[in-house]
Image (cartoon, rainbow, N blue to C red):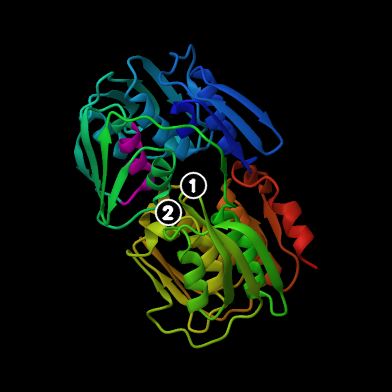
């Protein structure tokens, strides 16, 4: 989206094959953006103004596409409609509707859920907006809309959320002041196009990192992994639980931290109760990895507790319920709370029939759980991993023996 709005031509290398990313490209092409794609490279010719689309923009399963693109479209002078699949159509959008309407857009929805019918404003109003829920997607939507506003747009957070947008805005020539929990942008502003190598996704790497850590005798090295401080809490948590994970070759790519992750198998005992509790301060930086951490938690002495994670009930599936049901099927002891899970450990998991619930992160988490279990496990609906990581199972087969 940044490159589509930038001046000049940009080349994006190591572009993901995920369906979510394809949904974004398709939407941008409908908005008049010229895109060439080959293998893992994308070349985008930026434009200052989009073309009004002739049909609804299909965001597929991608909440990031819908929420952030809504911010872009809120600052256009035409009407657009954003639609998605059945799962996306059940996800809450009122959290972006409220600030974008304060900025001058008009957005119609179905009880705060997709489809979204957006009438943009050519001259959005700059606002100072305090996020009621920690959300990098909402923050990003407001900042993208603020590019066309005449004045300062500010987003105030109660807990620091992922900051890829702020870093990449600065990396592509738009100054964003990130002062702790206040993020500020002075508009109008426009990006300068350029080349970028996208770092490997830490949320995708996490499954292999966890698998290697849980299996004694393993050794795994992953190069070129994104180590953004708002994303790498996963590694910090695993190390606090007794995993042996090292970071090396740290460098920067367009303001994003990148490095090599080395994992030696085996988890030691002795993590404190505080280390084994994941709550509000950590939740925003671990939101995608929580089902996987629940799996790892079954092998931690004393078990773990996840709190303040009610947001997981509004993802591609109810991830708290899905995680609990699959872990119970594998013989784990746990208690499901409204906003989290209390998981006993260490537990001897047994092979079981598992359900992906059509959710890519549940599918990948329980593929890793299956590596630990006594006996075979069968996973229903594994094809959903194509949403974020089509190569997951082929890579898993390659790195396991």
**Left of 313 or right of it: where is 40?**
right
Residue 171 location in percent, x, y?
Answer: 43, 43
157 to 29, vertically: above or below: below
Task: Report which residue position mark 2 lands on.
Answer: 312
Q: How busy is the neighbourhood of tag 2: few (under 14 within 10 Å), some, or many (20 plus)?
A: many
The residues bearing labels 1 and 2 have C-alpha atoms spaced at a distance of 31 Å
Q: Please tell me whether residue 135 belongs to the stretch shown in magenta.
A: yes
Chief SS of the magenta region: helix
Residue at (48%, 11%) from the top-left corner?
54
Residue 64 spot, x, y in % from top left: 45, 39
Q: Looking at this view, is 233 or 258 the one in front?
A: 258
- Relative horizontal placement of residue 85, taking residue 40 as reference (left or right): left
Residue beneath the point at 56% across and 38% down:
195
Rendered image: mark on residue 254: 1
User: SS class of the residue under badge 2?
Assistant: helix
Q: Which mark is residue 78?
A: none
For the record, the magenta segment spans 134-144
Q: Secondary structure at mark 1?
A: loop
Is the residue under label 2 in contact with that under label 1 (CB below 8 Å)? Answer: no
- Return the disc, 1 or 2, that comes first in the chain's sequence: 1
């Amino acid at each position: 989206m940044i490159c589509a709005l930038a001046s000049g031509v940009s080349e994006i290398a190591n572009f993901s094959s995920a369906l979510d990313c394809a949904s974004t490209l398709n939407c941008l092409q409908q908005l008049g953006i010229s895109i060439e794609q080959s293998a893992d490279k994308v070349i985008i010719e930026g434009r200052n103004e989009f073309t009004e689309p002739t049909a609804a923009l299909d965001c597929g399963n991608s909440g990031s596409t819908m929420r952030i693109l809504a911010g872009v479209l809120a600052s256009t002078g035409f009407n657009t409609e954003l639609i998605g699949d059945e799962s996306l159509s059940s996800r809450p959008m009122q959290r972006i509707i409220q600030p974008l309407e304060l900025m001058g857009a008009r957005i119609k929805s179905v009880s705060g859920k997709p489809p979204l019918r957006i009438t943009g404003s050519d001259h959005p109003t700059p606002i100072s907006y305090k996020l009621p829920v920690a959300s990098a997607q909402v923050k990003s939507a407001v900042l993208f809309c603020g590019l066309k506003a005449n004045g300062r747009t500010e987003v105030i957070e109660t807990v620091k959320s992922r900051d890829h947008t702020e870093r990449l805005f600065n990396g592509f020539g738009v100054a964003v002041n990130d002062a702790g929990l206040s993020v500020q942008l002075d508009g109008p502003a426009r990006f300068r196009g350029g080349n970028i190598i996208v770092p490997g996704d830490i949320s995708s790497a996490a499954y292999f990192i966890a698998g290697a850590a849980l299996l004694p005798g393993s050794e795994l090295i992953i190069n070129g992994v994104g180590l953004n401080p708002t994303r790498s809490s996963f590694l910090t948590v695993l190390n606090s639980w007794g995993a042996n994970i090292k970071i090396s070759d740290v460098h920067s790519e367009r303001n994003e931290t990148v490095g090599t992750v080395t994992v030696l198998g085996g988890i030691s005992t002795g993590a404190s109760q505080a280390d084994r509790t994941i709550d509000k301060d950590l939740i925003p930086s671990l939101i995608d990895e929580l089902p996987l951490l629940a799996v790892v938690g079954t092998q931690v002495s004393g078990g773990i507790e996840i709190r303040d994670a009610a947001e997981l009930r509004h993802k591609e599936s109810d991830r708290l319920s899905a995680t609990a049901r699959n872990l119970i099927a594998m013989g784990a002891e746990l208690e499901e709370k409204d906003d989290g899970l209390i998981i006993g450990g260490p537990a001897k998991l047994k092979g079981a029939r598992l359900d992906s619930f059509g959710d890519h992160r549940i599918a990948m988490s329980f593929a890793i759980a299956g590596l630990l279990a006594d006996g075979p496990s069968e996973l229903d609906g594994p094809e959903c991993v194509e949403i974020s990581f089509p190569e997951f199972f082929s890579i898993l087969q390659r790195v396991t023996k």
